[in-house]
Amino acid sequence: MTSTTTDILGAYTRRADPFSAVVDRVPDDGWDRPSPCEGWNARDVLAHVVTSQRQFLAQRGFDATTAHPLDIDDPAGHATDPRAAWHAHDERMRELLADPSVTGHEYDGVFGRTTVGQSIVAFHGFDLVVHRWDLAAAAGLDERLTDDELDMVERSADGFGEHLYDDGVCGPAVPVADDAERQERMLARLGRRTPANA
């Protein structure tokens, strides 16, 4: 692997490992609980993460589907075993991101010329962090984002500009107290209500 490919895979791994840890902590009866994403339950959040990564790669000629029999491919877009489906997908993503022909593949994105690897780190890495919190909130888990993760989310939100509130990205920002902690302020910016600002 080139150093660039190693960097991309490492960046993905740093976001995917904590996401996996939350997926594994969601109780069996937690997948149908409502999430902070309006109209979505925890299962929907996971389906979104997997299908958005697959669709992004498929549009650039790379197949991220897996042979897992409980995949997120039923008519409703849901896996009967969400944990197994996620881990199969995650393994496939790591295989793809170890390949420099995948990570270095260039294309014209919304913000100009970029690569598959850069988009996985920037946009899909953002998704892995934010939706990790969404999954945890749906399951009643207290998930804390690190300062590094909050830095990344803040940079990403700044970089998205007006596109942050495009359909399918984030809902409108919600009010938050002046003395709210950093994580609560950032989540409110992304349209998420926490117990403190509900």
Image: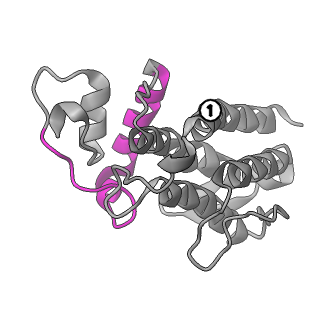
The residue sitting at 54% across, 40% down in the picture is 26
User: Which residue extends farthest front?
Assistant: 29
The location of residue 176, given as percent across then percent down, is: 14, 34
Quarter assignment of residue 170: bottom left
Name of the residue lying farthest toward the right: 1
Q: Amino acid at mark 1?
A: Ala
Side of 185 relative to 122 (left or right): left
The C terminus sits in image quarter: top left
Residue numbers of the magenta segment: 148-175
Q: What's the magenta bit mostly, secondary-structure-wise?
A: helix
With respect to residue 174, does 114 lie above or below? below
Q: Is residue 119 visible?
A: yes
- Residue under label 1: 21
Name the spot of residue 92 as percent of width and height, x first: 81, 52
Q: Nearer the viewer, residue 118 or 140?
A: 140
Residue 58 sits above or below residue 114 on the image: below
Dot 1: element:
helix
Residue 158 place in picture, x, y as percent = 34, 41
Q: Is residue 172 magenta?
A: yes
Q: Position of residue 132 (x, y in %)?
A: 50, 40
Decide if residue 51 is on the left or right side of residue 87: left
Residue 104 showing in the rendered view: no
Q: Residues within 10 Å of mark 1 (few under 14, many from 20)?
A: few
Instruction: Work out whether 177 lies above or below 54.
Output: above
Quadrant the N terminus occupies? top right
Residue 128 position by quadrant: top right
Query: Would residue 188 be counted in the magenta stretch?
Result: no
